[in-house]
Structure formats: C-alpha cells, structure tokens
C-alpha cells in the first residue's frame, strides 16, 4: 500500500479533489447560453393552444370563449388564463417569438420554438390510470404521447441531423409542469391521500425518463417545474371545504395537508433531478420552484399588488371561493372580474396573467430557479428584441 508521502498517492488525491470540485461546480451553476428556441412539454399551465387545436370545431371547450385571453391578446387563444402564461414570459425574456402550439397548427413556424403541452395531460399513461378507476380524461395526450409527437416531427422541425443537433443543444427545454392532473383525477374520484401518494414516485420516474431520453437526443438545458401549492387552488379548496379550521393555514387560508402533498412531490422530484445531474454533468438541469414562487402571493398579497386573502377565482361563480365545478369560466352563466390584475387565481386551477408574470420573473431572475440561471452573456439588445417580437405577434394574430 502506498504511503501518504507517495507522489502517486498525492496525485490521485489531487485528481479526486479536482474531479469532485468540477462535478459540484457543474451541478451548482448554469452555463450562460443564448437560447435559440424553446421546446415545451406539459399540461394546461404551459399550453398555448394545443387542446384547442385538438378540439372539435363544432364543440369547442369553455376556454375557447371570453373572457379567456381578454387581458393581453383580447381574444381567446387556447391559453388557460386571461392573458399570457409562464412560457410566454420566458419567450419574451429570451427575445424569442411566443411559442406556437404543435397540435392543430397550420403553417406555423417552429424554427424558434414548439409547444407540445396539452391542457388536461397526465404524466402517466391513461391505461395505467384507468386500472385505478380514472376514465374521464380531458385529453388522451400523455407525456409519452407528447414525446412521441416530438420525435416523429423532428425531420420537419430541423431538417438535417446536424440541424437537429444544433436545435437540441441550443434549446431551452421546458419539462412541465406535469403530474398535477394525475393527482387531481384521483382526488376528484375520492381516492385517499395514501393512494394518491403512491403515484408520486411513478410520476417522477416518468418525467425523469423523458428528460433522460431528451438528453440522449442532444438536449443540454432543462427547466423542470415542481407543483403548485395545491392546497391554495380554488378547485381543491371547494372540493375539500370543511368547518375544521385546523386543516387550514392560519396565514394563507390554504389547506395544509394538500400543500404538504405538493411539498412531498417536489422533494422527491428535486432528489431525482440531482441524481440525473450527477449522471450528466455536462447538462444544465434547473428546478423551477413553482410552489414557493406562487405561495408568496397568498402569504403577502398586498406586497405584490393582489387583494387581501386572494383565494377567490376571478372568473367563476358561487361558493366562498367564487367557484363551482358545474359553472365554468367561459360559459354564459359566468362572468370575469372587473380587474384581473388584483387576483391570483383566474379560474378553478389556473392563475391570472399578473400571477404568471411575477412567477416567471421569480424563475428567470431568482430566487426560484435552482441552480439560478446565468444571463451574463445576454445583452440589453436581446431583451429589447423580446418585447418587439411580442408586438409583432399581436400584429399578425
């Protein structure tokens, strides 16, 4: 055995320390990159029109009607909000065009981005959930279906293999949020919290597998969001309304046990992302803390310009939270509020443009991205071009 004075042993120790430093350094920092496009997967939180594109024109969903889209676009676009959603603000910040939906698009330009996120989508396959008594899906487009659509469309998206490599390496890949619907469907049919908890590792494994597959295709930068604070969502507050005040957070009025469920999901997701990062130190895997980026609005609403105790839906009717599941926003019996900028919640599950804007700023500029983005290589000209791209979108749509 070599002694501590052995030159060979000292070299091995130095090599080990340097290797450890490099791995740690890569996993705690992101490389500044001027992204050329955005590739998105997920559900209604990121949907920019896919569900609408997949819908029967003779039987359009409720979010195809006003007041959806009223604040920014001035007409419904298929987004589940009164205006822009988080992915729109990310695109603007990167001076990229707003990301077009893939499904149902005709003559869309996907050179600067493509979005496969579909409202109602699940992480897990429908056949798996059907075995557990879930059979009322809003869509049949799971994460696996979205990923399959992306792979099948690659020849049209980027042309040559070298172009595809360039696209993957220089794209910001938004992986989610997804998983909220998997849990919601089980909660909605009355499954116990323990039964729903059993899905968490399965959902995270599914997301992890998709990330790993995209890394194999050349993906270099992934933004992976966690869950919303589910106990603050209007639909859940209505579904689990109780006279037992001990179930509510005294500061926010949110359901404590449901928020703990979301924390459980996020804890397991972060552990899995750390595992993947160690396996692929050349890749940037960034966790987007949607939970705390949103929770702060319920904790200190006035600080962010929202009304006191902002647990009511802007667009809804009935009950203590201005929401009933049978009367959805976008139908004739429901009207939107007069000033959505004062509300956090838009409808039963989704947020207002005002909330999404502040959430996106917290992700892009900190402190709700782990590790934080490095934007040192971006010039002020790029940010100015972002607002110009948005203006052009409005002129052409």
Image (tube, rainbow, N blue to C red):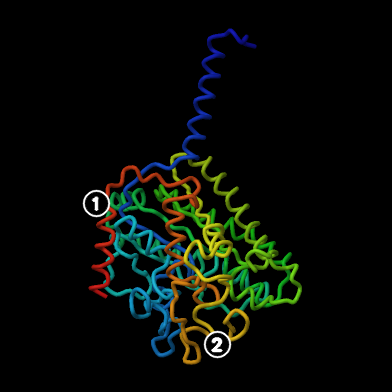
Label 2 crowd bin: few (<14), some (14–19), many (20+), radius 10 Å: some
Q: Is residue 301 visible?
A: yes
Position in image of residue 116 (x %, y %) = 42, 66
Label 1 crowd bin: few (<14), some (14–19), many (20+), radius 10 Å: few
Quadrant of the image containing the C terminus: bottom left
Residue 27 to residue 182: above or below: above
Foreground pick, 327 / 366: 366
Foreground pick, 376 / 182: 376
Residue 154 to residue 76: above or below: above
Position in image of residue 314 (x %, y %) = 50, 78
Mark 1 or 2: in front is: 1
Q: Please, what secondary structure does the residue beneath circle 1 have?
A: helix
Q: Residue at x 55, y 68 (%)?
A: 122
Position in image of residue 229 (x %, y %) = 59, 63
Position in image of residue 222 (x %, y %) = 44, 51
Q: Please, what secondary structure does the residue beneath circle 2 have?
A: loop
Q: Residue at x 61, y 10 (%)?
A: 4
How many numbered marks are there?
2
Pointer 1: what residue?
381
Pointer 2: what residue?
327
Report whether 264 appears left or right of 113. Answer: right
Quadrant of the image containing the N terminus: top right
Q: Residue at x 49, y 45 (%)?
A: 371
Earlier-in-chain disc, 1 versus 2:
2
Residue 29 to residue 46: above or below: above
Report whether 11 appears left or right of 58. Answer: right
């Amino acid at each position: 055995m070599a002694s501590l004075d052995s030159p060979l042993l000292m070299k091995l120790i130095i090599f080990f320390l340097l290797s450890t430093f490099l791995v740690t350094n890569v996993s705690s920092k992101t490389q500044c990159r001027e992204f050329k496009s955005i590739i998105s997967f997920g559900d209604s939180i990121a949907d920019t029109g896919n569900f609408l594109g997949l819908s029967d024109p003779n039987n359009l969903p409720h979010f195809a009607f006003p007041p959806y889209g009223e604040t920014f676009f001035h007409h419904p676009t298929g987004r589940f909000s009164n205006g822009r959603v988080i992915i729109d603000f990310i695109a603007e910040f990167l001076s990229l065009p707003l990301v077009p939906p893939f499904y149902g698009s005709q003559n869309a330009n996907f050179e600067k981005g493509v979005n496969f996120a579909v409202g109602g989508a699940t992480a897990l396959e429908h056949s798996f959930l059907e075995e557990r008594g879930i059979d009322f899906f809003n869509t049949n487009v799971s994460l696996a279906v979205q990923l399959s659509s992306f792979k099948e469309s690659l020849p049209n998206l980027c042309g040559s293999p070298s172009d595809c490599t360039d696209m993957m390496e220089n794209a910001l890949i938004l992986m989610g949020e997804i998983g909220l619907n998997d849990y919601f469907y089980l909660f909605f049919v009355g499954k116990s919290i323990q039964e729903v908890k059993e899905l968490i590792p399965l959902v995270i494994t599914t997301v992890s597998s998709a990330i790993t597959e995209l890394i194999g295709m050349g993906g270099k930068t992934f933004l992976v969001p966690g869950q919303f604070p589910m106990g603050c969502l209007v639909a859940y507050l209505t579904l689990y309304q109780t006279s037992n005040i001990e179930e509510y957070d005294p500061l926010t009025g949110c359901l404590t046990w449901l928020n703990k469920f979301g924390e459980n999901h996020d804890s397991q997701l972060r552990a899995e992302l750390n595992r993947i990062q160690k396996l692929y130190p050349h890749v940037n895997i960034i966790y987007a803390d949607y939970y705390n980026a949103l929770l702060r609005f319920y904790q200190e609403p006035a600080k962010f310009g929202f009304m006191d105790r902002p647990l009511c839906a802007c667009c809804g009717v009935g009950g203590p939270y201005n929401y009933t599941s049978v009367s959805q926003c976008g139908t004739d019996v429901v009207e939107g509020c007069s000033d959505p900028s004062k509300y956090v919640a838009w409808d039963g599950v989704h947020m207002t443009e005002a909330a999404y804007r502040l959430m996106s700023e917290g992700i892009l500029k900190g402190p709700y991205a782990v590790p934080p983005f490095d934007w040192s290589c971006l010039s002020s000209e790029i940010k100015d071009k972002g607002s110009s791209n948005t203006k052009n979108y409005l002129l052409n749509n």
